[in-house]
Image (cartoon, rainbow, N blue to C red):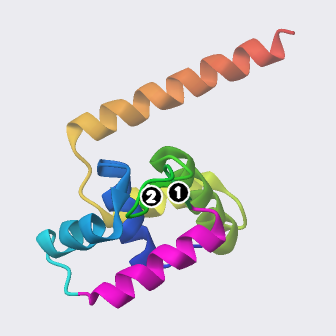
Amino acid sequence: MHVTDAERRILDVLWADSPLGAADIDAALAAAGGDWHRKTVNTLISRLVEKGALLLADESRPKRYAPAIDRRTFARAELSELARGLFGGRVAPLVATLVEAEQISDEDLSALKALVARLEADAGRDGDD
């Protein structure tokens, strides 16, 4: 499912706190420095419902919304699409480009090393079957 940057900002609000009504979403966006009209927020919410990215949380009035997908699952799908589009589906060039573009902390470097070690161990176990 493709969402625009504006739609993702709605999802960001709901990943942080949900379920919320449209007025609460609008207030959270404004608090984060957004300058959107309420009608725009309502349109974006409607689009996200149509795409299946948001669910009605319950039958209450006013309507309250919750994400239909968690942030991690969404991020995985977006990154897979990015890897396919820019790097022919290859992960290493995607990670290398990201690391080269951003300042990597010692903590992130350690996490990446641990991830590679875990992946290598998992690959070794798969070969033993």
In the rendered view, does 126 fall on the left or right side of 43? right
Residue carrying label 2: 65
Please check the rendered image and state whether residue 112 is part of the magenta-colored stretch, yes or no. no
Residue 117 percent coordinates (x, y): 51, 23
Residue at 37% x, 64% y is 62
Magenta stretch in the rendered image: 36-53
Can you see residue 32? Answer: yes
26 or 127, nearer to the observer: 26
Q: Which residue is mark 1?
A: 56
Q: Residues within 10 Å of mark 2 (few under 14, many from 20)?
A: many
Q: Is residue 1 left or right of residue 21?
A: right
Q: Quadrant of residue 26?
A: bottom left
Marker count (numbered): 2
Question: Which residue is found at the position 56% from the left and 47% from the top?
Answer: 73
Residue at image location 72% in from the left, 67% down from the top: 88
Dot 1: within a 10 Å radius of its alpha carbon, few (fewer than 14), some, or many (20 or more) residues? some
Q: Residue furthest top?
A: 128
Q: Position of residue 121 (x, y in %)?
A: 62, 17
Left or right of residue 45, residue 2 in this image:
right
In the displayed structure, 129 sits above or below 98; it is above
- Residue 106's quadrant in the figure? top left
In primary-sequence order, the first of circles 2 and 1 is 1
As shown in the figure, which amino acid type bears the numbered disc 1? Leu
Q: What kind of element bears circle 2? A: strand
The magenta stretch spans residue 40: yes
User: Where's residue 96, x and y in %?
Assistant: 47, 57
The answer to whether any part of residue 1 appears in the image is no
Tag 2–tag 1 contact (CB < 8 Å): yes
Camera-side residue of 2 and 59? 59
